[in-house]
Image (cartoon, rainbow, N blue to C red):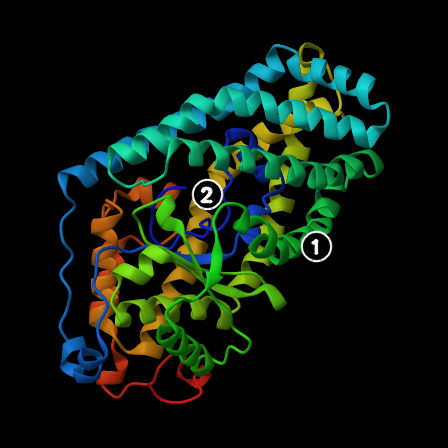
C-alpha cells in the first residue's frame, strides 16, 4: 500500500498483479474495502490544559501550503513512472498468456485435474494466480519494500513483507475462486445478457465483502485492539453521537510495524461498521487534528458514501462487462484460434476478459476519480462543520504532505488518472476559505448534527 492521503484501500492489503487482476475482474474492490482513509504526519498531542485554553482565534488563522520538497518531487516523479510501468507490465503478462497459448494450456490441465466445471474454474484460477504473482514479484518487492525504505516511509521487516505478501496471495485465491464462477456461469446460461446479470449478482458479494473484510481479513495483517487512550476514545464517541452515529466502535491497529505514515478509515456495514485508527496517527497528531479526521470519517458514514460506492461499483461492473461483451467477438474472430479458444465462456478467456476490462477502466478512470474526489470533498466539509476547526484541519493536511512526501499541487494528468482525493493543496485552500459559522451563514450539514459544537 502506498502512504497517501485519505485512501480507501488502507484496510485491504491486496498487492500482487494477479490479485489486482482478480479484483479488477469484478470491480468489487471499490466498495469492499470501505472508504475515506486518512494519512497524516508529525504532531504532538495536546494536553488537557492546553485544549481547554484554546480560543476561537486559534482556528481563524489560515494555513499556508508548503512547496513540495525535492525528495517529495522525486517520489512523485518516480511514482508516476512506476504507475506507467505497472500498467504496461500488467497488460504484457495478460497478452503473453494469450498469445503464447499458455492460458489454453492451463485450461486443459485444469479440465483433466478438476473434471467438473466448477473445479476446472478454481484450478485454472489458482494456476493463473500463481503464474502472475510470481511474474510480478520483482516489481512488487522493489515498489513495496525497497522503494518505501529508500524514501524513509517504511518500518516493515523483510519477513513481515513476505508474510503479508503470502497472506494477500492466499486471500486473493479464495476471493477469486468465490467470485469467478458468477460471470462464467452466466456466460454459459445467458450469452447476451450475462454482463447485466453479473452486475446484479455481484451486489451481494460487495455487501458481504464490506461485512467480512473488517472482521476476518484486515486482522490477518495487523493486530486490532480497543483504543488504549480511553479519554480520546470518549471524545471520538461523543463526536460520533453528535453526528447521529449509534453503536460506533473505535479500533486501534499496530501499523507502526509496517509504516511511518499515519492513517485512519471507516469501514464495514451494519454490525461491522467501525472507525479504525493506526497507532501512528494517535501518537503523532494533535487532538483537534485527530477529531477533524474523525469528523471526515463520520461524514462518509452519515452521508451514505459507502452505499453510493456500492451502487457506483455495480454500475461500473455492468458497464465494463458490457464493453467486454461488445468487443470480445471481434477479437476472438481474428485471434481466437491462436489463443486456443473461440468463446468468452471458456475459462481460458480470463486474460482476454481482464484486458478488455483494463482498457475500459483506464478510459473511465477520470470519471471514477471525479466521483470519489467529490465525496471526499463533501466529507471534508462535514468534518469542518461538525468540528469548526479550520486551522487544525489545514495543519493536519500540511503534516500529511510532509509525512507522506506528497506533491500538494500535482499536474492535471495525475489528478485525472491517479488522484482519488482532492490534491492536498486544494484541500488546504478549501479549509482556509470555508468557515460559514464565523459569518453566521447556515451550515450545509448542520441539520444532521444533534447539538452545537
Residue at x 68% of width, y 34% of height: 325
Q: Is residue 354 left or right of residue 190?
A: left
Rendered image: mark on residue 365 = 2
Determine whether 121 is above or below 320 in the image.
above
Closest to the observer, 110 or 186: 110
Residue at x 61% of width, y 35% of height: 170
Residue at x 53% of width, y 35% of height: 20
Closest to the observer, 338 or 158: 158
The x, y position of residue 25, in whole percent, is 61, 37
Closest to the observer, 5 or 160: 160
Rendered image: mark on residue 25 = none
Q: Splitting the image into 4 quarters, where does residue 323 fall?
A: top right
Task: Report crowding for label 1: few under 14, some 14 to 19, many 20 or more residues within 10 A (C-alpha).
Answer: few
The answer to whether residue 344 shows anywhere in this view is no
The x, y position of residue 190, in whole percent, is 82, 39
Q: Where the N terminus falls, by quadrant?
A: top left
Determine whether 30 is above or below 90 in the image.
below
- Look at the numbered disc 2 and give the secondary structure of its residue: helix
Q: Is residue 71 left or right of residue 166?
A: left
Determine whether 161 is above or below 130 in the image.
below
- Look at the numbered disc 1 and give the secondary structure of its residue: helix
The x, y position of residue 133, in whole percent, is 54, 25
Determine whether 123 is above or below 64 in the image.
above
The x, y position of residue 164, in whole percent, is 49, 37
Q: Disc 2 vs disc 1: Cβ atoms closer than 8 Å? A: no
The answer to whether residue 271 shows anywhere in this view is yes
Q: Which residue is mark 1?
A: 204
N-terminal of the pair, mark 2 or mark 1, is 1
Distance from disc 2 to disc 1, alpha carbons, whole Å, reads: 24 Å
Q: Splitting the image into 4 quarters, where does residue 390 fall?
A: bottom left
Amino acid at each position: 500500500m502506498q502512504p497517501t492521503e485519505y485512501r480507501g484501500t488502507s484496510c485491504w492489503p491486496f498487492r500482487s498483479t494477479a490479485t489486482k487482476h482478480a479484483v479488477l475482474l469484478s470491480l468489487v474492490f471499490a466498495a469492499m474495502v470501505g472508504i475515506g482513509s486518512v494519512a497524516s504526519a508529525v504532531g504532538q498531542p495536546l494536553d488537557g490544559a492546553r485544549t481547554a485554553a484554546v480560543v476561537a482565534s486559534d482556528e481563524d488563522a489560515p494555513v499556508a501550503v508548503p512547496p513540495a520538497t525535492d525528495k517529495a518531487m522525486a517520489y512523485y516523479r518516480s511514482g508516476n513512472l512506476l504507475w506507467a510501468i505497472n500498467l504496461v507490465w500488467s497488460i504484457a503478462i495478460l497478452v503473453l498468456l494469450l498469445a503464447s497459448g499458455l492460458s489454453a494450456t492451463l485450461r486443459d490441465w485444469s479440465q483433466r485435474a478438476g473434471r467438473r466445471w466448477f473445479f476446472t474454474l478454481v484450478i485454472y484460477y489458482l494456476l493463473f494466480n500463481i503464474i502472475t504473482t510470481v511474474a510480478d514479484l520483482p516489481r512488487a518487492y522493489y515498489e513495496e519494500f525497497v522503494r518505501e525504505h529508500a524514501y524513509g516511509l517504511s518500518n516493515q521487516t523483510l519477513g513481515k513483507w513476505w508474510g503479508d505478501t503470502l497472506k494477500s496471495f492466499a486471500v486473493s485465491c479464495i476471493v477469486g475462486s468465490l467470485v469467478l464462477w458468477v460471470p462464467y456461469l452466466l456466460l454459459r446460461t445467458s450469452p447476451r445478457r450475462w454482463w447485466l446479470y453479473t452486475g446484479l449478482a455481484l451486489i451481494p458479494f460487495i455487501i458481504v465483502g464490506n461485512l467480512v473484510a473488517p472482521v476476518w481479513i484486515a486482522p490477518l495483517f495487523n493486530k486490532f485492539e480497543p483504543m488504549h487512550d480511553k479519554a480520546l476514545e470518549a471524545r471520538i464517541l461523543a463526536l460520533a453521537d453528535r453526528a447521529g452515529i449509534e453503536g460506533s466502535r473505535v479500533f486501534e491497529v499496530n501499523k507502526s510495524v509496517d509504516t511511518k505514515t499515519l492513517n485512519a478509515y471507516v469501514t464495514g456495514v451494519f454490525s461491522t461498521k467501525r472507525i479504525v485508527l493506526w497507532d501512528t496517527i494517535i501518537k503523532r497528531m494533535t487532538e483537534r487534528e485527530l477529531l477533524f479526521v474523525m469528523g471526515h470519517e463520520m461524514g462518509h458514514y452519515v452521508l451514505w458514501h459507502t452505499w453510493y460506492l456500492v451502487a457506483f461499483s455495480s454500475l461500473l461492473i455492468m458497464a465494463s462487462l458490457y464493453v467486454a461483451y461488445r468487443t470480445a467477438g471481434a477479437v476472438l474472430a481474428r485471434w481466437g484460434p491462436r489463443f486456443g479458444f473461440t468463446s468468452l465462456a471458456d475459462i481460458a478467456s480470463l486474460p482476454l476478459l481482464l484486458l478488455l476490462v483494463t482498457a475500459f477502466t483506464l478510459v473511465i478512470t477520470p470519471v471514477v476519480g471525479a466521483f470519489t474526489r467529490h465525496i471526499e470533498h463533501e466529507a471534508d466539509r462535514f468534518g469542518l462543520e461538525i468540528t469548526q476547526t479550520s486551522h487544525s484541519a489545514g495543519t493536519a493536511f500540511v503534516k500529511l504532505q510532509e509525512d507522506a512526501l506528497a506533491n500538494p499541487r500535482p499536474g492535471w494528468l495525475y489528478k485525472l488518472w491517479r488522484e482519488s482525493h482532492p490534491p492536498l493543496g486544494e484541500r488546504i485552500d478549501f479549509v482556509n476559505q470555508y468557515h460559514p459559522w464565523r459569518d453566521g451563514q447556515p451550515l450545509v450539514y448542520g441539520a444532521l448534527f444533534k447539538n452545537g459544537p
